[in-house]
Every structure is written in C-alpha cells, then in structure tokens.
Image (cartoon, rainbow, N blue to C red):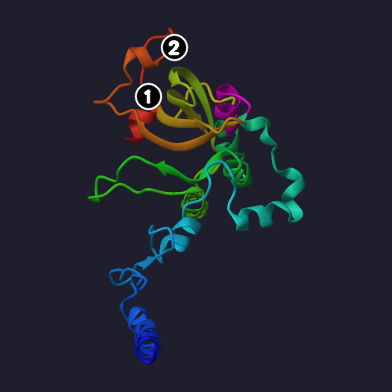
Amino acid sequence: MKKIFAFAATLAALAAGAAPASAQIAPRPSPPPVAPPGVTATGSQRLHDPNAETEQQRMPTPGWPAPERRAAQAGPGAAGRPSDSDGFSVDAILAALYASVSHGEDGQPNFDRMRGIFLQVGMLVPPKDPRGELFTVLDVDGFEERVRKSIAAAKQKGEPTSFFEREIARKADCFGNVCQVFSTYESRHAPSDEKPFVRGINSIQLVNDGRRWWIASVVWDTEKPDKPIPAQYLPNVPSVIPQEYLKKN
C-alpha cells in the first residue's frame, strides 16, 4: 500500500511540473507583418499608403466643385451663378461655354459660370506659342489670370477688349457618358461685325455623371493661311479665311 501511495505521489508531482512546460511550448501568435518603410499594414493585410489621404483630397470627385468654390458660391455673387441647367444637355453646355467667354468692351468673361460647367481638374489648352517648347495647360483659374492680363495689355495699347465667340459648325461623337466634340468657332469684337477676326476649332471632351454634363477639357487651334479649316468642319459655306485675319497674321 505504501508503494501505491508513493507511485501516486510521483505521478502527481510529474503532472504539476508538466503544466509550466506545456505552457512554454504552446504555439505563440505570429507577430504582425513588418511593412516596408513608409507603408503600414492594416488588420486585413491591405497596405495603406500614408500619402493616400492627401492624394484623395487632391483628386476631387468629378462633377462637384472644390470646397473653396462651394464657399464662393455662397458669397455675394451666388445669385448670379447658373444652375445645373447649363449641364442639362450637350447643346446646353456648349452654349454656356461660348456665352461665358463672350463679353463687351467694359466687361470680362463670366468665370464663375465657367467654373459651373468645368470639372475641377478641367483643362484649357490654347495653341502652342511658337516661341516656347511646351504647351500651356490651364485650369479655369489659370485661364482667368491669363485673360485678365490680356485684357489689361490690350487696354494699355488702345486695342479693343470686347470678345464675342459663337459656334458655326459641330461634329460630335458620343458613347454612353462621354462625348468628343469638334466645335468650329468664329470670334468677333462685336456681334454685329460682318466678318470674324479669327476662326478655329475647339476640341471639347465632355463627361456625364448620371445627373448632368461637364467639360473635362477644351483644346483649340486657330485657322492660318497655310492651315485652313477642313470643309467637313464647316457649315455649307465656302471655306474663306477672313481678310482681316490674314492681315493680322
């Protein structure tokens, strides 16, 4: 009987010492993965770019004005701002574009209206300056600055500053929510002028967000003596370059 009790005591002692040992060899949870410098691993193992939030702020939602523009819309000039009717159709938004850039002698383009029809990141690309190596790419704010300087320079020279532009022909290719439009234009200093002082083609890219149309970009070029507008981009009239334009260029 003493031997049985001794054997039982030995087993109990071994069992008591085995518990810590089993705890020591129990599998431990794997350490979190070490991400490369500048990248933080999340619980779902997707990598998070610390610059993503900043980039997201820089990349606006297409079709909605930037915060500063929303604030401006609530300002004193808000009553004069157009509604979404300018983006109701391709016809409407192109009419708004030409109306917004046209102005009288003592006026200027309606830049607020332009901001209401362009995406935040919408671009305006004028013809390349032959003296430079690169194209000038502008947003509406940059276009406003450029036009203001041009008007001021014209006033100093005693030149007319009024500007009226209208569409005379259009070729549009559309699919789904995108449209590419070749819009042929004429520019005059007064609507009553018999002939334009310049003609050209606006290449206009349009997108629809399911609610209305927006202008993504406008790239244009002007007619030159050695570069007449092709007949397919003109209305059914002879392709004649205005003499006033030829004299100035």
Q: Residue 145: image x %, image y %? A: 49, 55
Q: Quadrant of the C terminus?
A: top left
**Residue type highlighted by circle 1:** Gln
Badge 2 marks a residue whose secondary structure is: loop
Q: Residue 185: image x %, image y %? A: 46, 25
Give neighbour class at mark 2: few <14, some 14-19, many 20+ (Cα, 10 Å): few
Q: Which mark is residue 235?
A: 2
Name the residue carrying label 1.
243
First reached walking from the N terminus: tag 2 or tag 1: 2
Quarter of the image for residue 231 reads top left
Q: CA distance from mark 2 to mark 1?
A: 19 Å
The outermost residue toward the front is: 1
Badge 1 marks a residue whose secondary structure is: helix
Q: Residue 99: image x %, image y %? A: 60, 33
Q: How many marks?
A: 2
Magenta span has 106?
Answer: no
The outermost residue toward the top is: 236
The residue stretch that appears in magenta: 88-96
Q: Residue 119: image x %, image y %? A: 52, 42
Q: Residue at x 55, y 33 (%)?
A: 209
Q: Is residue 29 visible?
A: yes
Nearest the viewer among 105 and 63 is 63
Kindly report the secondary structure that dominates the magenta region of the rendered protein. Answer: helix
**39 w.r.t. 147: above or below:** below
Q: Residue at x 57, y 36 (%)?
A: 102
